Image (cartoon, coloured by chain):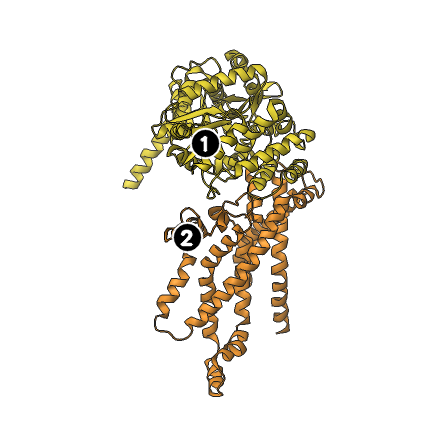
Amino acid sequence: MSEWLENHLPKMVLAPSFIAVLVFVYGFIGWTAWVSLTRSKLLPKYEIKGFIQYDRLFASPRWDTAMNNLFIFGILFIVIAMILGLMLAIMLDQKIRTEGVIRTIYLYPMALSMIVTGTAWKWILNPGLGIEATVRGWGFENFSFDWVVNPDYAIYTIVLAAVWQSSGFVMALFLAGLRSVDGEIIKAAQVDGIPTWRIYTAIIIPSMAPIFLSAFIVLAHLAIKSFDLVIALTGGGPGYATDLPATYMYTMAFSRGDIGQAASSAMIMMLVVFTIVVPYLYSELRSKNDG
Amino acid sequence: MKMTAFAAVSTIAMISATSAIAGPEAEVLHWWTSGGEAKSVAVLQQEFADNGGTWTDMPVAGGGGDAAMTALRARVLSGNAPTAVQLKGPAIQEWYEEGVLADISSVAEAEGWADVLPASIAGHMQCDGSWCAAPVNVHRVDWIWANADVLEANGIAMPTSWDEFNAAADKLSAAGIIPLAHGGQAWQDATVFEAVALGILGADGFHKAFVELDEATLTSDAMVAVFDQMRTMRGYVDSNFSGRDWNLATAMVMNGEAAFQIMGDWAKGEFMAAGKVPGEDFLCASTPGDGFLYNVDSFAMFDVDGDDKKAGQDLLAKLIVGQSFQEVFNLNKGSIPARTDVSMDAFDTCAHLSAADMQASSDNGSLLPSYAHGMALRGSQSGAITDVVTAHFNSDMSSADAVAQLAQAVANSY
């Protein structure tokens, strides 16, 4: 009896969560895929009508804007947040006295919700209230910083706010990575008279590759599911200039009663996630098999 | 011990509460949760209780009704629809097609709704010839509001054509006043757009374009002219308009920072709440052009089981369209009664103008549903049009491109 338990307990304990994931993640992915092939409007219908929703999706200029924004936002956000985070981490790694205080200061934005970040930056960037008005108040009458109301630049304000929010977190990740590098190697390099910047570029950073991968995965999924920041900061505007796939899907499903269209956009979003996650999983699994 | 006593008392209370229900019952899903609106619903709740009914309130705030619609979808899918739901325009027909609406023709016929409601508004309340919804109020959308002092100081009269409006706006710009207070949100862009479209296309053209979705009208030269006027109007708003809420734009007119605002008559509530007097502090007029764009709130009646609930539904429908509720509710909300035989004595001058115009335009066929507020088209079609309107207004897209995109977007919205 006890042997039977010993053999089966892990399976029994895991079963509920396994079933929950099976139904609520993969089951609903399947359901969404099905609905995306129908002409569902207000309520889901289950009669398959082919790829009409995808045709509509790719013919929609608003979806084009949303996808372009996702790439602009995703790439800039990930790259800038990683560079800034790495630089902050390296500077904090110089054994400075107030490291604890500074680390907390940079990490704190992460404690705010995206809604708060978005609302605060909305006011800071608002030409009539924030930076522009302040600088003009100092006497620089021609100063102009109206990105948030300019349809061509508004997406960069989203990048700005998102980087502000997340780079402290990336810094913490990298700092942990820096600290985990074997001190003996660094000392050996110092003894050999290698300059500090070479120690970083040739030894420390390459040995942190797994941390880069983790940071990238965390930031990439933050970028793809970004929704609240856009809603709070620009509301998708001006016009629909800062729409992202997530806000597009929300509008279709909940404001316009166009569930089929929303489902097809959700499927495309999932494909985007897969193109990032699948190579990652592949490399992870392969390295395990090799080991 | 204390807990047991408490549990016992609350059980008794629950039992007695359940057994007390015998009369009509109604569960009402709505999103009237802010100040004046909540007060307006309380009026209906009170009347319902006075007639022996039990009202279960189900307010779902957020997203201009989006959250309430999500709640409704969940309730309907689980086979447990509320008795009455705040719904309007073609959404009523959409839900009817899902086969979940009730027939309240017996009440409507006994109360003679067909005789007291304007024909085009009554049309929205009927599903395949039977009555399925009850109208609450009529908001007029094509209003232009103005600061009386600013107009007087600059020697400007209320514009009666878009050319006059442009001339007045140029004059105001030169005087350093923002001509048009506007908030750059998609629905506000659409509100201005439909007022302009009504003026330039005329009532027939508006009906063809935004009710029938006639492609020839959507791609006509007149439509290009509508977008041209929108481009001109873009020059009359301040540079900081993006994302501004409509009530902040109204405040700009109130304090003289801006001269005009184009907005439905809920803006009047803002003026009134600030103690401004219509005709003295602020002026109201219909936007240039003939016609009347209405936004009618209504309650759609859903299929429910049980005689209590059916009785509640009938009572609710009767009260909603009843004269006393129509008067009190609309005094609170700033709109006008949907039925035309309510005494307007207690209403202000703007409401008088609105009521007179509604009657006149109903007679000559220019009483039209507002597209921007979801009265003319289904969500996906009106949304597709709004996408083009807001993209054009917020960029340097040419009018010809906008018209081409408009036709393409409408074709792609089915």
User: From where the camera sits, is residue B412 visible?
Assistant: yes
Using the image, tell me which numbered label, if any, was put on residue B260: 1
Label 1 Cα crowd, 10 Å radius (few <14 / some 14-19 / many 20+): many
Using the image, tell me which numbered label, if any, was put on residue A131: 2
State which chain disc 2 sits on.
A
Quarter of the rendering containing residue A37: top right
Q: Nearer the viewer, residue B46 or B332?
A: B332
Quarter of the rendering containing residue B44: top left
Look at chain A in the picture and name its colour: orange
The residue at 48%/50% (across/down) is A146
Q: Is residue A200 left or right of residue B208?
A: left
* Position in image of residue A103 (x %, y %): 39, 66
The residue at 32%/35% (across/down) is B8
Same-subunit check for callouts 1 and 2: no
Look at chain B in the picture and name its colour: yellow
Q: Is residue A252 left or right of residue A158?
A: right
Amino acid under disc 2: Ile
Label 2 Cα crowd, 10 Å radius (few <14 / some 14-19 / many 20+): some
Q: Nearer the viewer, residue A276 or A6?
A: A276
